[in-house]
Amino acid sequence: MAGDPAVVAKLEELLATLRGLGDPRRASLEWKQVHRLLEKTDLPKAGAAHVVGMRDVEALAGLVDQLRTPAPAAGESSAPAPGDVPDAETCRQALKAFRKRLALTKLDEESQLSRSPLSKGTDWMAVAAIELPGEFPDAVWLELVRQGKLRPLGHGMYSLGEP
């Protein structure tokens, strides 16, 4: 997947800057620029948002490598290899784990004792999104996003997709 050479060059420059820092996770301005540049590419938005949200320099290097390599020709198959796509059972278990984590997070938030006595309802504290459970690989979550069962909201947060 080849990207715009100017965008790739700027991403490489930012990647070098991030690698040169002692703690690249604290470089908010650089990560903000990376996010804006990645939005201009044809990379999957969920994967790019995950890399920026987690501030993962090595994953960013992988995305830049993907942008440097040319896209497959029209005759070549662009579908992922059969080993790369998780099976339906793994996706089902991951979605079940996500729903369970979301429900537990909502229960935890509702059981807080530090609620304002002046507020009536619980609508203001409705949990809309959570971080992905770490027990499944990223390929499973990306597949669930592709299927529309999960929706990325940015900064590593995901919510259930539309039913």
Image (tube, rainbow, N blue to C red):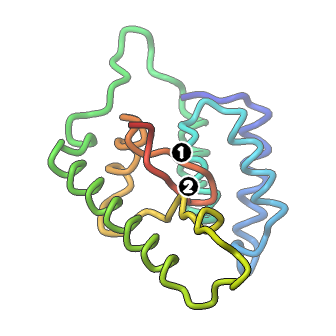
Q: Which structural element holds mark 1?
A: helix
Is the C terminus in the top left, top right, bottom left or bottom right quadrant?
Answer: top left
Q: Which structural element holds mark 2?
A: helix
Looking at the image, residue 67 sits to the left or right of residue 32; the answer is left
> Residue 61 lies in what quarter of the image?
bottom right
Looking at the image, residue 145 lies above or below residue 49:
above
Given residues 150 and 140, the one toward you in this image is 150
Looking at the image, residue 55 sits to the left or right of residue 85; the answer is right
- Give the spatial CA distance, label 2 vs label 1: 6 Å
Residue to which mark 1 is pinned: 46
What x and y, as percent, mark residue 93?
21, 56
Given residues 14 and 159, the one toward you in this image is 159
What x and y, as percent, mark residue 28?
80, 66
What x and y, as percent, mark residue 154?
62, 53
What residue occupies the far top of the structure in this picture? 75
Given residues 138 and 7, the one toward you in this image is 138
What x and y, as percent, mark residue 90?
19, 52
Looking at the image, residue 117 lies above or below residue 153:
below
Are the residues tagged 2 and 1 within 8 Å (C-beta)? yes
Residue at 49% over, 65% down? 131
Is the N terminus in the top left, top right, bottom left or bottom right quadrant?
Answer: top right
Residue to which mark 2 is pinned: 50
Q: Crowdedness of circle 1 by 10 Å Cα count: few (<14), some, many (20+)?
A: some
Residue at 66% over, 33% down? 41
Residue at 75% over, 59% down? 31
Given residues 114 and 58, the one toward you in this image is 114
Q: Amino acid at mark 2?
A: His
> Residue 104 lies in what quarter of the image?
bottom left
Count of marks placed on residues? 2
Q: Amino acid at mark 1?
A: Ala
